[in-house]
């Protein structure tokens, strides 16, 4: 078990020591990992929990009369309860385990689309969505004849709320919006978006992939109808994620996939479906993933989301200040409210070259369009260099990154 | 010189560099000096799409030998293109089509030719060989 203290401020050296991978060397340098927005590293407690599960607890869940199966079921359902607490959902049955944010969105777009979308209806998304929150809706629209509408983004990378208001209408059947942009770092006013949509009785899905690792999320305070995130971005394992849905919506939606676990009775004439949340969890679930995710969320709560937020805000401000001082550097995404992501371009250089030369110095950043091509088109750029931070990054990471960047730029310009 | 003699020459040139810094400085230099492709060929027909960087490639056949010109929006990609052109340009279509490009690995730049890198280079090499095959076929016809 990690001994990280609960404190006002993060004990950053202890936190870093909790993440074995961070002590790796990369090309002869200590690794500087600045790509947590793509996927985060895992604390030891998550690795140990998964290992322990497979060594001592594993059996298929929900079906066994024997003790081991009951223990596995209990561990799996305890993980669900941890997710409920993490999101402050009202009930455990509102927490559906899925593969990740992408599957959560596909579940909703598919089940909601089949039941509620028809020709002439509209689905409202925004110009800063990840492809995962665009393509599933395009597919649902294609199948139903509904139309996809897009809320534009201003130069700073904020949603144009006037346009949002204008685009909302009785034709709008659902709104899908990213909580925190993975490319710009913008924190969107989802509470306000949800309140305005609800005035017209329109449900809202929030893509919380980038919010879960950085913000305190309260789905009841937000009044979100659906909220999705991926485990691997919140220090949990890959292949597990969460769809939160309000009970009334999860009751209303038809199942997504058919199979075992999701049924009550099956005859060849008719099948009746299991109750929530199992109705949406066809087949043997990813037990180890869910339990590992539970350990990750415990870890985050132990550090404290407020302390994590303060630490990251401070890093973001520090890095932004240093980057702004570099000649010809342009930050893409300068919203009032941002979290843990800096995208930028440097005049006269290509992101691929900068990323390659940073890699040679042991510094991992992401370059490209970050799965947000329409957003890149909005700015008229092919891609950016993106540095993203998590709770285990510190000022020395930023210093090495900035020094590495300056060296790369001297070579390239 | 044959394709392999040029490859060996490049390998021995790169032996002088003891760290990545010098190697990349040299690549960047090569990239900056790469003869630009004739603007008329920098169109979608000549574009090889990579997710990370884009490459334009044009081939000419003169006196039974192929001449390549190319460009990229990323300078390191361009540097590697310059090396590929140095190795393959001026040879017959058959030689190009059958070339075994071992030098990239030997000078430690294999990562740039990995398909996951998505910088257009893998497709570019494929395209160069296809041009070779295509021009060879045309010549035979
Ligand atoms: C904002 C956002 N939405 C959705 C996703 C998709 O997440 P996953 O690939 O884990 O399903 C990502 C991940 O990159 C993301 O950043």
Image (spheres, coloured by chain):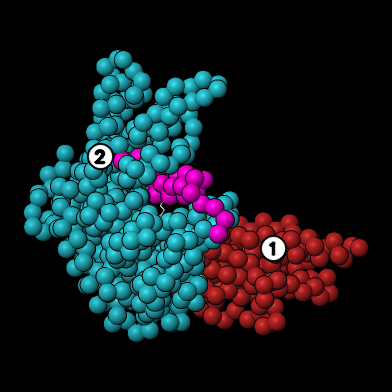
Chain colours: A cyan, B red
Q: Quadrant of residue A354?
A: bottom left
For mark 1, name the chain. Answer: B
In x, y percent, where is residue A405?
A: 35, 73
In x, y percent, where is residue B19?
A: 41, 66
Nearer the observer, A153 or A237: A153
Does residue B63 appear to the left or right of A279 in the view shown? right
Pointer 1 residue: B127
Pointer 2 residue: A91
Rendered position, B134 above or below A295: below
Q: In the image, is residue A111 part of the stretch drawn in magenta?
A: yes
Query: Residue lying farthest right?
Result: B141
In x, y percent, where is residue A302?
A: 15, 47
Q: Is residue A28 visible?
A: no
Query: Residue lying farthest bottom?
Result: A327
Please state the extent of the stretch shown in magenta in the rendering.
Answer: A94-120
For mark 2, name the chain. Answer: A
State the SS at label 2: loop
The N terminus of chain A, quarter of image: top left
Q: Residue at x 9, y 49 (%)?
A: A5
State the SS at label 1: helix
Q: Is residue A45 visible?
A: yes
Does residue A179 appear to the left or right of A84 in the view shown? right
């Amino acid at each position: 078990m990690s001994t990280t203290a609960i404190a006002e401020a993060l004990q950053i050296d202890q936190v870093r020591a909790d993440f074995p991978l961070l002590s790796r060397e990369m090309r002869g340098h200590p690794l500087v990992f600045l790509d947590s927005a793509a996927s985060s590293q895992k604390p030891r407690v998550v690795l140990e929990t998964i290992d322990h599960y497979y060594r001592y607890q594993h059996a298929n869940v929900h079906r066994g009369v024997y003790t081991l199966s009951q223990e596995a079921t209990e561990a799996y359902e305890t993980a669900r309860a941890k997710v409920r607490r993490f999101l402050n959902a009202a009930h455990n049955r509102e927490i559906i385990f899925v593969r990740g944010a992408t599957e959560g969105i596909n579940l909703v777009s598919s089940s909601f689309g089949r039941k509620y979308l028809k020709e002439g209806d509209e689905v409202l998304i925004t110009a800063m969505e990840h492809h995962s929150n665009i393509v599933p809706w395009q597919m649902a629209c294609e199948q139903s004849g509904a139309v996809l509408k897009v809320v534009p983004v201003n130069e700073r990378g904020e949603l144009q709320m006037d346009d949002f208001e204008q685009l909302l209408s009785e034709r709008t059947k659902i709104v899908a919006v990213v909580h925190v942009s993975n490319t710009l770092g913008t924190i969107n006013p989802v509470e306000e978006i949800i309140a305005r949509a609800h005035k017209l009785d329109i449900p809202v899905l929030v893509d919380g992939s980038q919010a879960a690792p950085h913000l305190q999320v309260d789905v009841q305070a937000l009044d979100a109808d659906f909220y999705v995130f991926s485990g691997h971005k919140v220090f949990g394992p890959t292949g597990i994620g969460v769809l939160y849905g309000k009970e009334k919506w999860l009751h209303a939606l038809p199942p997504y996939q058919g199979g075992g676990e999701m049924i009550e009775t099956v005859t060849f004439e008719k099948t009746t479906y299991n109750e929530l949340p199992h109705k949406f969890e066809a087949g043997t679930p990813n037990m180890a993933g869910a339990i590992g995710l539970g350990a990750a969320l415990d870890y985050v709560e132990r550090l404290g989301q407020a302390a994590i937020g303060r630490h990251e805000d401070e890093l973001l401000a520090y890095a932004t200040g240093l980057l702004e001082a570099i000649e010809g550097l342009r930050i893409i995404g300068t919203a009032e409210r941002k979290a843990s992501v800096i995208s930028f371009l440097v005049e006269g250089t290509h992101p691929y070259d900068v990323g390659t030369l940073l890699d040679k110095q042991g510094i991992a950043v992401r370059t490209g369009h970050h799965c947000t091509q329409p957003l890149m088109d909005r700015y008229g750029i092919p891609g950016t260099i993106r540095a993203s931070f998590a709770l285990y990054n510190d000022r020395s990471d930023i210093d090495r990154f900035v020094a590495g960047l300056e060296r790369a730029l001297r070579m390239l310009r | 010189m044959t394709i392999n003699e040029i490859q060996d020459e490049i390998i021995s040139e790169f032996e002088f560099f003891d760290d990545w810094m010098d190697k990349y400085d040299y690549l960047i230099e090569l990239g900056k000096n790469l003869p630009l492709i004739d603007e008329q060929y920098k169109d979608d027909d000549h574009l090889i799409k990579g997710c990370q960087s884009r490459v334009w490639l044009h081939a000419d056949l003169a006196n039974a030998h192929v001449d390549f010109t190319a460009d990229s929006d990323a300078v390191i990609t361009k540097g590697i293109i310059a090396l590929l052109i140095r190795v393959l340009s001026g040879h017959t279509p058959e030689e190009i089509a059958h070339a075994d490009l071992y030098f990239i690995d030997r000078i430690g730049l294999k990562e740039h030719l990995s398909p996951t890198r998505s910088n257009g280079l893998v497709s570019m090499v494929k395209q160069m060989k296809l041009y070779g095959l295509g021009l060879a076929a045309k010549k035979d016809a």
